Amino acid sequence: DHFRPIDKRKGETLIANAMNNGSEIAKGFCTFRGWGGLEKNSTDAFDIFMNVASSEENPNSFAMIGYMFKIGLGPKKCKDMEEAIKWLKKAVSCNHSWAQCMMAYCIQEGEGIKKDETTALNLYLESGKLGYSKAMYNLGELYHYGSQFIKVNKKKALYWYTLAAQQGHDRARFKVDNGEFEGRKKKKENDGKGKHRKAKRGSQIYYGEQ
């Protein structure tokens, strides 16, 4: 992400190369995903991330630890939102865009932390301004449909959907291409780059998964 389309294959190669060059955090990612010839093992990956976090101020390790607690892949293999929030906060304090997006979703839904849509919106904005496409999509959703505390704003919705779509976010592509924003699109687009391919429908908020 970070204002660039995702290339998963290239990302996997770069992380595997970093591991081969001695990066412990990269080794953690490869162990978590089963990349670089390693066997997929979430327990070993968690231990690696914890070792990295204890030896250096590494926001990637903080975010991964928070994520693993959030989805039930911590030491006890059960969801632990108290620990998840603690580690995500550490990553957010380092301006980690993925962690900002995950934390925003937790706050938006009141998952492990007090629900506060305004705070969630501001965190999504921070993440989106750093170029994280899933935060951009969530901003599009919030402005598109509105809520008790957030007013509908189709102009802002299209703006954030378009940014996410430019980075290959399929749901954002569908939102941009389905005709609802056609009048606004004609004013802002026509850049000669062609149409995005359409994606499947999906109105559920999509937060920052790795």
Image (cartoon, helix red, strand yellow):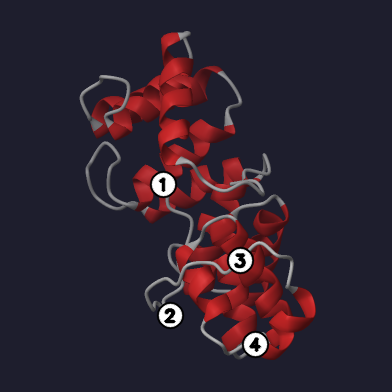
- Would you say the residues marked 2 and 1 are in contact, meaning their CB atoms lie under 8 Å apart? no
Residue that mark 3 sits on: 194
Residue that mark 4 sits on: 182
- Going by the numbered disc 4, the residue's amino acid type is Glu
Instruction: Kindly identify the residue that appears in the image at 57 percent across and 69 percent down.
Output: 195
Q: Secondary structure at mark 1?
A: helix
- Would you say the residues marked 3 and 4 are in contact, meaning their CB atoms lie under 8 Å apart? no
- Would you say the residues marked 4 and 1 are in contact, meaning their CB atoms lie under 8 Å apart? no
Q: Nearer the viewer, mark 3 or mark 4?
A: 3
Q: How far apart are labels 3 and 1 at the CA level?
A: 36 Å
Residue density around tag 3, few if under 14, some if 14–19, many if 20 or more, within 10 Å:
few
Q: Nearer the viewer, mark 2 or mark 1?
A: 2
Instruction: Kindly identify the residue that appears in the image at 25 percent across and 30 percent down.
Output: 43
Total of numbered circles in the picture? 4
Q: How far apart are labels 3 and 4 at the CA level?
A: 15 Å
Residue that mark 2 sits on: 203
Residue density around tag 2, few if under 14, some if 14–19, many if 20 or more, within 10 Å:
few
Q: Residue 130 versus residue 119: which sits nearer the camera?
A: 130
- Residue 165 lies, in percent from the top left, at 57, 64
Instruction: Kindly identify the residue that appears in the image at 43 percent across and 80 percent down.
Output: 203
Q: Quadrant of residue 103?
A: bottom right
Which badge, 3 or 4, comes first in the chain's sequence?
A: 4
Q: How far apart are labels 2 and 1 at the CA level?
A: 23 Å
**In the depicted structure, whether residue 148 falls above or below residue 133:** below
Residue 142 in the figure: left or right of residue 35: right
Residue density around tag 4, few if under 14, some if 14–19, many if 20 or more, within 10 Å:
few
Residue that mark 1 sits on: 67
- Would you say the residues marked 3 and 2 are in contact, meaning their CB atoms lie under 8 Å apart? no
